Image: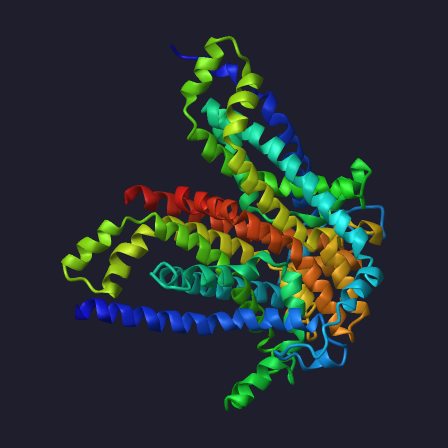
Amino acid sequence: MKLSKSLYSYYLIWPALIIYSVFFVLPAIIGLYYSFTDWRLDRDAIRFIGWDNFQRIFTDKTLLLALKNTLIFAVITVIGKNVLGIALAVALNMRLKSRNFLRAIFYSPSILSVLVISIVFTPMLRTEGTINRLFESVGLGSLSQAWLTDPSIVIWTISALAIWQHTGFQMAIYLAGLQSISKDYYEAATIDGAGSWKSFLNITLPLLLPAININLMLTLIGGLKVFSEVFVLTGGGPGNASQVVGTIILRAFGEGSWGLGTAMNTLLFAAVTLISIPLLIFMRRKEVTE
Amino acid sequence: MSFSKKAALRNYLVEAFLLLMSLTIIVPLLIMIFGSFMTSAEVLEFSLRLPDQWLFSNYAQVFKEGGLGRAFLNGIWITGISSILTIATSSAAAFIIARRETKLSGVLYLFFFMGLIAPMSTITTIKVVQWLGFYGSITSVIFIYTSLNIAFSVFLYSGFIKSIPKALDEVAFLEGANMFDVFFRIVTPLIVPVNATVAIMVFMSVWNDITIPLYFLTDSSTWTMPLSVYNFYGKFSRDWNLIFADLVMTSLPVLILYLFAQKYIVSGLTAGAVKG
């Protein structure tokens, strides 16, 4: 016998739906409207000003730099976290004696607050800090940098630290993916005479695709939303050299330029959706064909 | 024979390399932990060595001057209530979405799924919270965290509930049970492991977060650990021993949770990786 669907009434959805709609969806929708206004903290009247906020974002040097830095951070961390994450997962899926210890160590920074990691590294990244001293002591003094005070490298330093902290999280997802691959494939490949590199390319990578997909999405979205690392390490400095969208929104909020801040948010929203939705559809299709 | 020898050698090389790499993680964390027991002069080297004398008093001092007792309790309260609220609302919603399998439930699933992708709109969220009249309060922050975690939790729960045979529900319905009986007596006991995963994920993200408190907690009596620590870091920028002690105390709850609940973290990750 077939049970009527209406036995499952929609009542139980309401609590989640209301909280989610009021505190997440509604702000996003009214944000669309406010991005086209000159909404300010110190003025009661709100005027509709068309595309002015966006025009300002794309002509203001600092705001453009923030967009560029956000993209750099996102791309670098996507590549770093995933390449290193796969490498670590494959290595830690081997029969090593210290496997569990190493897994725990590599995972551990990702459970700590970004704030904690950023503060711990601040003194170490100084010009006379631990990292440069280490380079000098092993004869690589030429590699030492003004990690957080040289405007041309500061965003790269911040990206590298984010990779250092979060690769373990990606590694854990890849490990879960690897463990779902049957050993039979590798045995068959070995019998056919395939080396480990060939097995990796022809078996591991394709079968790891669901994990790769989810990790690419997670790291890309997380990368575009970057805020805490920059806020704690440099506050957007030196000057404005490491500003990202997240820190610009905070600054606009602090200055009372709420319309502009909201426009910046809308831009981020548009970028994230425009990049991730086609990616999602593409991935779905690929998984089906395989 | 030679093949397995070669493989063994390769394993040793990989292991040696990984152990070396793990130092890049162990050393900075140890510098923080050892530094938290040093004098304020000793710590300034920022290098790996044991303190001359273990000053446990640093912790007492930080706890007093940083107002950490309050921040700790605020953090526990906010993370605890947000977790419970997220679990209760998302599991109920996911139950209906997973069971109805109609067009509308599909649309609702996508509607929640959007929340996994879209960034939150901070400034207008403040506006909404002001309209509702509780801007600056701990309650507002609890609702915001819940709304941010619902997307991911509905996704996790509905995947899991779909794997529970519907026949179980049907038998209960035939015996005269209603939807609430089915949800509380049949589904709820089966999703306990997912509850644990969600609780841990929410706890870790909320406990560690600094962004929401920065925008929404305007009064220092409502701050959680990260914001108190950040403030302390600004005020006591010369006393790195105290700053380190402060950071260790912020990290302890999540580290302890991680040690005891690893299993559930891994199962949460597996759900994401395997089901895609």
Q: Quadrant of residue A54?
A: bottom right
Image coords of residue B2 (percent x, y): 18, 71
Image coords of residue A126 (percent x, y): 65, 80
- Quadrant (top left/top right/bottom left/bottom right) for the N terminus of chain B: bottom left
- What residue do we see at 47% from left, 28% from top? B98
Front residue of this view, candidates A88 and B257? B257
Relative side of B272 to A48, left or right: left
- What residue do we see at 67% from left, 51% from top? B207
Image coords of residue A271 (percent x, y): 54, 53
Image coords of residue A152 (percent x, y): 59, 78
- What residue do we see at 68% from left, 63% from top? B248
> Residue furthest toward the left?
A192
> Residue furthest toward the front?
B53
Relative side of B26 to B214, left or right: left
- Quadrant (top left/top right/bottom left/bottom right) for the C terminus of chain B: top left
Relative side of A115 to A88, left or right: right
B146 shown above or below B31: above
Q: Quadrant of residue A11?
A: top right
Q: Does the image show residue A115?
A: yes
Front residue of this view, candidates A290 and B230? B230
Q: Does the image show residue A61?
A: no
Please count the marks in the image.
Answer: 0
- What residue do we see at 28% from left, 43% from top? A289
